[in-house]
Image: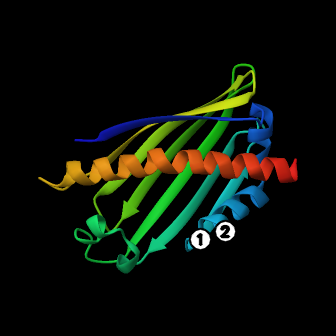
Amino acid sequence: MPRSFSVSDESPASVEQFHAALSGEDYWLARLAASGESTTFESLIVDSDQTVRMVVVQDVGRDLLPGILARFYRRDLTVRHAETWRSIGEHQLRGEISVTVSGGPGSGCGVALVTPNENGSRLTVSGTVEFEVPLVGGIIENFLAREFTRGIPELQRFTTTWIGQHC
């Protein structure tokens, strides 16, 4: 059964600055470099309506997986992470995020909303993770949901810092 998670974080950066950062390849390359992971930047497309579509692919060796996951994955994995961001309404940004795993039974998806507030902007992400293994899937789903809940504010801090240095 998929596990849901929700997390919010604030930033002094405006919605427009956030959108501008997401639209640039230099932002994504810096974000990938900061993660320290072996990830391939596959594509970045910015449509005429300023919709941003980004895809990265990560090859994860079984030896690099957290212990709880390594017990269930008997080979290396390929993780495909895709994000689509578009303006909605006035001064709002909506993101659709998907994570699929080749070589394993895990996946995740989420919806992000960046809205203005009195100090800049607020990012809210709601998502689900699914790990289709009988009996232990729920344990792993809970672990992954906690990891996303911790990781999203870290990404928001990175983005805020990057915007402060580049915009």
Above or below residue 44? Residue 40 is: below
Name the one closer to the observer, 89 or 150. 150
Q: Which residue is mark 1?
A: 36
User: Is residue 28 visible in this depiction of the protein?
Assistant: yes
Q: How many marks?
A: 2
Give me the residue at 85% from left, 53% from top: 165
Most distant residue in the left direction: 135
User: Is residue 23 visible in this depiction of the protein?
Assistant: no
Q: Position of residue 70 (x, y in %)?
A: 29, 71
Name the image quarter holding residue 127. Answer: top left
Q: Amino acid at mark 1?
A: Gly
Above or below residue 83? Residue 125 is: above
Q: Position of residue 128 (x, y in %)?
A: 37, 40
**How far apart are labels 1 and 2 at the CA level?**
6 Å
Q: Are marks 1 and 2 in contact (CB under 8 Å)?
A: yes
Above or below residue 164? Residue 121 is: above
Q: Amino acid at mark 2?
A: Ala
Q: Position of residue 100 (x, y in %)?
A: 41, 56
Above or below residue 68? Residue 95 is: above
Q: How is the image coloured?
A: rainbow
Give me the residue at 60% from left, 43% from top: 84
Give me the residue at 70% from left, 58% from top: 28
Q: Is residue 159 left or right of residue 136?
A: right
Q: Which residue is mark 2?
A: 33
Q: Position of residue 2 (x, y in %)?
A: 28, 41
Name the one closer to the observer, 76 or 64. 64
Quadrant location of the N terminus? top left
Give me the residue at 30% from left, 78% from top: 75
Q: Is residue 48 left or right of residue 64?
A: right
Other-residue count near label 2 (Cα within 10 Å), few / some / many at <14 / 14–19 / ≥20: few
Q: Secondary structure at mark 1?
A: loop
